[in-house]
Amino acid sequence: MADPNTDATRKLLAAVWEKNLPIVRERVEQLASIVTLVQAKVLDSGQREAGIATAHKLAGSLGMFGYTEGTAAARAIEQALDEDTIDPNHLAAELTKLRAALPL
Amino acid sequence: MRRILIIDDEDDIREVAALSLESVAGWEVITANGGAKGIEVASSEKPDAILMDVMMPGMDGPTTFREMQKLPAIAHIPVILLTAKVQGVDQRRFSGLGVTAILFKPFDPLTLADQMSEALGWK
């Protein structure tokens, strides 16, 4: 028999996810913009820092809602943006994984 | 009943941690959305423990912890840091602060209270 406390917690979590979905979508789109800037070789340091911060926030939160592959992709994007030389293909591939991991 | 102060600038993290500790463990939760506010709430509410994010705008977690240590009224309250940093160098830096424990984001909402209880010696 399911634990009623666990079931109640899962329902509350689902409600929090739904409420925060617009913020998650916005953050994923911010990262998509960063990837576009990297591909165009016009990313500046402020944009890079903003991208790292956005990826860090997603990495720290998606797994709480069960999206562990989303956390892994966001963490890979955070690390890729922190490299001395950013690989645009790797970044784009991780963005694709991030999108695929989430019900956006 | 245990009373926990959660300090995090991210609304979703505060919300999930709070519902986790309330619904799973039955603890009372109070929250603050930044380090300065957290010190204020800790001073007025005297929680049994504090769960605090590392990366926050303004006063970050380590700075907030050091400021708390200067205040005799709250310096004794155990602090658990919450971080999404996975690199060993960051973990060693946070461990050196003297906090009770470091937990990692993303946490599992169904086991967060257990992890905290274990770290705090409440089990």
Image: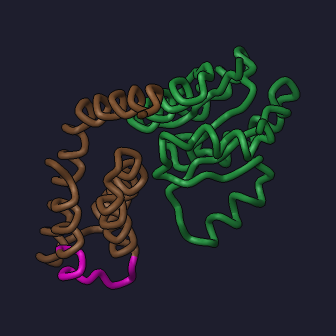
Q: Quadrant of residue B89?
A: bottom right
Q: Position of residue A74 (x, y in %)?
A: 32, 62
Whether residue A84 appears in magenta in the rendering, the answer is yes
Hue used for the chain lettered B: green
Question: Would residue B33 be found to the left or right of residue B45 on screen?
Answer: left
Residue stretch in magenta: A83-92
Hue used for the chain lettered A: brown
* Whether residue B55 is visible: yes
* Whether residue A49 is visible: no
| Rendered position, A89 above or below A52 | below
Q: Quadrant of residue B16?
A: top left
Q: Position of residue B94 (x, y in %)?
A: 69, 58
Residue at image coords 49%, 52%: B105
Q: Position of residue B6 (x, y in %)?
A: 58, 31
Residue at image coords 66%, 53%: B102
Q: Position of residue B106 (x, y in %)?
A: 46, 51
